[in-house]
Amino acid sequence: MSEYVLRTRDISKKYGGAYAINNVSIEIKRGQIYGLIGLNGAGKTSFMRVVCGLVSPSSGELELFGQTGEKELQRGRRRIGQSIETPAIYPNLTAVQNLEIQRIISGVPDKNAITKTLEIVGLADTGNKKAKNFSLGMRQRLALAIALIPNPEFLILDEPANGLDPRGIIETRELLRRLARERGLTLLVSSHLLDELAQVATHYGIIDKGRLIKQLSADELALESRQHIRIITKDAAKAIALLKENFGVTDCQAVSANELWVREQIERTGEMNTLLVRHGIVVESIAVTEQKLEEYFLNLTGGMNT
């Protein structure tokens, strides 16, 4: 049995003359919650659609559960549950009726799977209420239930918390954690709520303009975004030169013309402030902080439109 649920090698998808995804190579191991991060239009949904077989890649190689042949990929996709873009929900049917249709389509013989799945997502008491009368949060949970009916090993969710209120976001977060913990599911989740995703994901892939620019684990992210001194000043470059000369710092960077981070000698923050002021550098703010996932993403890509 392969330790990898998904591996892609230089996967590209081209529409006309433009690449939606361009040479994307991703590896996801069993049990991981993999957060796919990117701007709107960066290629997240296109990548998920390729993995699920909803569109064919223009080039590259895809491997599911250790298999690469076309027939093997088709079999592998039967082990995937997915909710991408607009969920396939019948608005005039109840939650039970929606799941019954999906159960039949998926070839699941156990009718008790419907009740069990509705209990998992918190929709067991919706009775005869039709899906069109569900709140947005309820519809999102119904879409997740539809993805879970086939009892998948790999769950792919595109923006599962999109449009939810804070309570719904928290419920979704806890549900994803529970699915990974109790059912051993591997998850691929995209989201623009980056700091929320940081509370769930074990690994990350950052995609920008169709290209995967970085993969890292939660531990690696914690190391890269570790505690640092954040200094806002009129001249970051001059401030860095002074700190290097007087404190011997090496792990520092200018993240913009007016902002720098120092990742060492945290305990000497006050002394650094005194030095800069003494040399005529206006320090607008200086504080010890930790970089959030959203800030980390912005620094890698140079901006974000949600």
Image (tube, helix red, strand yellow):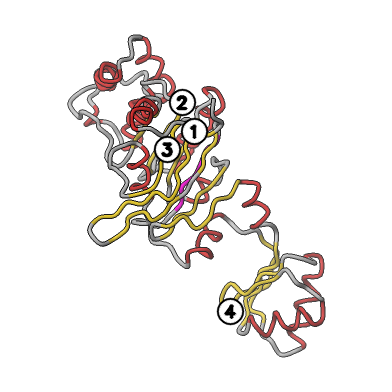
Please tell me whether residue 7 is drawn above or below residue 237 in the rendered image. above
Q: Position of residue 98 (x, y in %)?
A: 25, 22
Residue at the bottom extreme, as displayed: 280
| Res. 61 mark | none
Task: Please tell me which of labels 3 and 4 falls first in the chain.
Answer: 3
- Principal SS element in the magenta part? strand
Q: Position of residue 102 (x, y in %)?
A: 28, 21
Residue at the front extreme, as displayed: 69
Q: Amino acid at mark 3?
A: Gly
- Residue at 27% x, 40% y is 86
Q: Is residue 19 magenta?
A: no
Q: Amino acid at mark 1?
A: Val
- Asked if marks 3 and 4 touch (Cβ < 8 Å), the reply is no
Report, in whole angstroms, how far the alpha carbon at label 2 lies from the one at label 3: 24 Å
User: Which callout, 3 or 4, points to the residue nearer the camera?
Assistant: 4
Residue at mark 1: 5
